[in-house]
């Protein structure tokens, strides 16, 4: 379905981003992976996807907190592959604290990576996509782009902003062959969530298993985590012809969280 297309997935050396990247590669897209980590591990991931899926895969370590680096990532991709068809803005960080104790440096870092990076990437990618008369921008927001939780001022603000940015770009690109949508996952078992489970276990003096159940029971009615593979499937659907008229919208993949 995506043979001949070129996709960038930011924050794709692990977790959600890697799940999405693998799904796009399975459908034939050439990939630009982006993210931090051990160079040897990243190379193993890159070469493994290239070998198993039969697509071209490169890694670009652009720092998503820097405007010039983000825009440079787009420019280098177009220079290397001659086109850019799919941009998945997935890179994100988290920090929790009450608002009156929230460090300004953490606020700034979360907004830079979770919101501003998407803006800079989109702004640089849209002209190329419009020239091609086809493009898919998918912003990985969060249930926290639609509802709030305590102690997550920066994350909730950034993800709400990302949903708003999605709507604006969807409207501005309407009729050009370019769509922009947000995917809003609930709890996914990533390192970020593992830390929250561990914190609950310590605070409540309970086991990891009990803490996991407690975390899910509070928000996610299915009592099951969303998987990176499921999110990859959602992104793939948004890149399919069936989604040609879906733009400027937020799709919840949250086990019923926001239905409550």
Image (spheres, grey):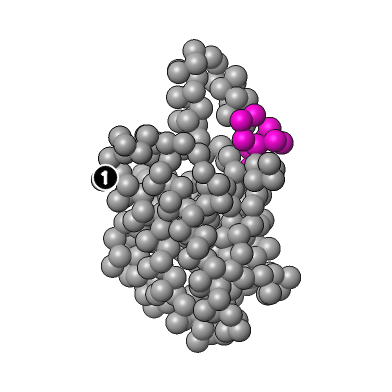
Q: Is the magenta stretch mostly helix, strand or loop?
A: loop
Name which residue lies at 43% across and 53% down.
158
In x, y percent, where is residue 257?
65, 42
Which is more toward the observer, 26 or 225?
225
Q: Decide if residue 177 is in sight here.
A: yes
Instruction: Quarter of the image for the N terminus: give it.
Output: bottom right
Name which residue lies at 37% across and 61% down.
116
Instruction: Quarter of the image for the C terminus: give it.
Output: top right
Which is more toward the observer, 241 or 222?
222
**Which residue appears farthest toward the front when viewing the image?**
100
Q: Is residue 181 left or right of residue 75?
A: right
Q: Is residue 220 magenta?
A: yes
Mark 1 secondary-structure assignment: helix
Question: Can you say whether 52 is above or below 99 in the image?
Answer: below
Q: Decide if residue 86 is in sight here.
A: no
Name which residue lies at 69% across and 45% down.
259
- Magenta stretch: give its range: 217-226
Q: Does the magenta stretch include residue 172?
A: no
Find disc 1 in the rendering and name its residue. Answer: 104
Mark 1 nearby-residue class (10 Å; few <14, some 14–19, many ≥20): few
């Amino acid at each position: 379905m995506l043979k001949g297309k070129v996709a960038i997935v930011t924050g794709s050396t692990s977790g959600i981003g890697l799940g999405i990247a693998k799904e796009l590669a399975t459908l034939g897209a050439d990939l630009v992976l982006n993210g931090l980590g051990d160079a040897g591990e990243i190379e193993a991931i890159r070469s493994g996807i290239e070998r198993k899926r039969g697509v071209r895969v490169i890694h670009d370590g652009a720092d998503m907190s820097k405007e010039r680096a983000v825009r440079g990532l787009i420019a280098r991709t177009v220079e290397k592959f001659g086109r850019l068809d799919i941009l998945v803005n997935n890179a994100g960080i988290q920090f929790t604290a009450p608002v009156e104790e929230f460090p300004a440096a953490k606020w700034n870092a979360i907004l830079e990576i979770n919101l501003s990076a998407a803006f800079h990437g989109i702004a640089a990618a849209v002209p190329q996509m419009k020239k091609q008369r086809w493009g898919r921008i998918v912003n990985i927001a969060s249930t926290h782009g639609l509802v709030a939780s305590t102690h997550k001022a920066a994350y909730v603000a950034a993800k709400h902003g990302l949903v708003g940015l999605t709507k604006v770009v969807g409207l501005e690109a309407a009729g050009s062959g370019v769509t922009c949508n947000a995917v809003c996952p609930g709890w996914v078992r990533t390192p970020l969530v593992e830390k929250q489970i561990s914190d609950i276990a310590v605070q409540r003096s309970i086991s990891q298993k009990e803490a996991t159940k407690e975390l899910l029971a509070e928000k996610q009615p299915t009592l099951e985590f969303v998987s990176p593979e499921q999110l990859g499937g959602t992104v793939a659907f948004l890149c399919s012809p069936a989604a040609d008229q879906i733009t400027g919208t937020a799709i919840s993949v949250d086990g019923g969280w926001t239905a409550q």
